[in-house]
């Protein structure tokens, strides 16, 4: 299983759970090598197999290189979790091209680049044995995001639509594609808008924010044969938000 953005937050939780569940795990990161190493070591300490792979998944050449490295280190890819993403806080009247481009590269282009490489390896059309792709969206796609988060919300809307289209494109080729839409999950992604405050967490119908492991368990379920007929679906993990 390759988990993009597997070094921290939700991705780290997915990688750890995958390692404990018997997957050999490729832990992708872009900047935080020590966090990725912590995840890799935790998996190995638990008796699992894991390796760290540095690549900016918003950059085509880096994604191609990473997949070649994963092929060499871990062999056949069974599951891709397109989890890496960034949050931003900027009102529309202040928006600039670099911020907008960076947001779409990290959150949307990454999905295309990584899914392309996965489909080339998994699709029965290309001699593969099938596989599973799980894409990390957000409830921001239907709620519009937090203040100053229009660009982030727009990328998540694109992810929902891309996932649906991809599920139709490759569903007959042995690849299941599904989407998770987390709500407010306690991770460092919220540092960009000053962290998650108590009032925000209490506004969630279930009365609290969520934990990364609560998303990770859904990702592992979607990857498993228990979800063998779940395809083209969007699973909200958002406490009713
Ligand atoms: P996080 O704690 O900030 O972790 C982000 C992860 O993504 C890190 O591992 C980071 O790597 C990696 N990353 C970021 N940009 C990357 C790039 N260009 N290439 C490769 N890796 C990259 O975030 P999170 O809260 O776990 O979010 C994970 C996903 O869930 C995102 O797609 C996010 O939009 C989505 N989500 C989160 C929430 C929430 O409330 N937390 C809600 C809805 C959706 P480094 O460690 O190297 O920086």
Image (tube, rainbow, N blue to C red):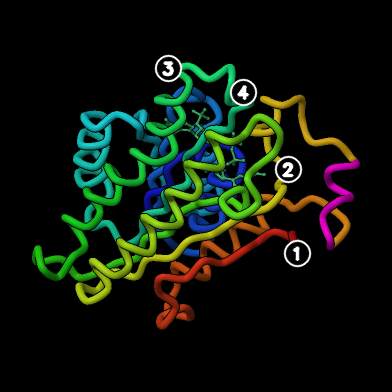
Image coords of residue 56 (percent x, y): 36, 28
| Secondary structure state at the residue bearing disc 1 | loop
Foreground pick, 134 / 53: 134
Q: Which mark is residue 98?
A: 3
Q: CA distance from mark 3 to mark 2?
A: 27 Å
Q: Which residue is mark 2?
A: 186
Q: Which residue is mark 1?
A: 240
Q: CA distance from mark 4 to mark 3?
A: 12 Å
Label 2, ligand 1: CB separation under 8 Å:
yes
Image coords of residue 80 (percent x, y): 36, 55
Q: CA distance from mark 4 to mark 1?
A: 26 Å
* Above/below status of 145 relative to 75: above
Q: CA distance from mark 1 to mark 2?
A: 16 Å
Q: Which of pointers 4 and 3 lies earlier in the amino acid sequence?
A: 4
Magenta extent: 199-205
Q: Which of pointers 4 and 1 lies earlier in the amino acid sequence?
A: 4
Q: Quadrant of the N terminus?
A: bottom left
Total marks in image: 4
Q: Which mark is residue 90?
A: 4
* Above/below status of 129 relative to 237: below
Q: Which of pointers 4 and 2 lies earlier in the amino acid sequence?
A: 4
**Which of the two marks, 3 or 1, is nearer to us in this view?**
3
- The residue lying at 63 percent from left, 24 percent from top is 91
Q: Quadrant of ligand 1?
A: top right
- The residue lying at 10 percent from left, 68 percent from top is 125
Foreground pick, 235 / 71: 235
- The residue lying at 53 percent from left, 25 percent from top is 34
| Secondary structure state at the residue bearing disc 4 | loop
């Amino acid at each position: 299983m390759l988990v993009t953005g597997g070094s921290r937050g939700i991705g780290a939780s997915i990688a750890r759970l995958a390692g404990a569940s018997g997957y050999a795990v490729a832990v992708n990161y872009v900047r935080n090598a020590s966090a990725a190493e912590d995840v890799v070591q935790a998996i190995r300490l638990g008796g699992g197999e894991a390796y760290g792979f540095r690549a900016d998944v918003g950059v085509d050449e880096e994604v191609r290189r990473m997949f070649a490295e994963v092929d060499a280190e871990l062999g056949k890819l069974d599951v891709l979790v397109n989890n890496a993403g960034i949050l931003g806080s900027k009102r529309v009247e202040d928006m600039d091209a670099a911020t907008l481009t960076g947001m779409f590269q990290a959150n949307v282009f990454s999905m295309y680049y990584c899914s392309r490489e996965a489909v080339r390896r998994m699709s029965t059309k290309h001699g593969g044995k099938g596989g599973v792709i799980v894409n990390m969206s957000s409830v921001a796609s239907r709620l519009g995001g937090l203040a100053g988060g229009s660009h982030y919300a727009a990328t998540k809307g694109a992810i929902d639509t891309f996932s649906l289209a991809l599920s139709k494109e490759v569903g007959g080729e042995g690849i299941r594609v599904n989407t998770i839409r987390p709500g407010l999950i306690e991770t460092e992604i919220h540092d960009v808008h000053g962290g998650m405050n108590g009032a925000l967490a209490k506004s969630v119908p279930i009365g609290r924010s969520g934990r990364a492991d609560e998303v990770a368990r859904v990702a592992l379920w979607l990857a498993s044969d228990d979800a063998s007929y779940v395809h083209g679906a969007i699973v909200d993990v958002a406490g009713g938000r």
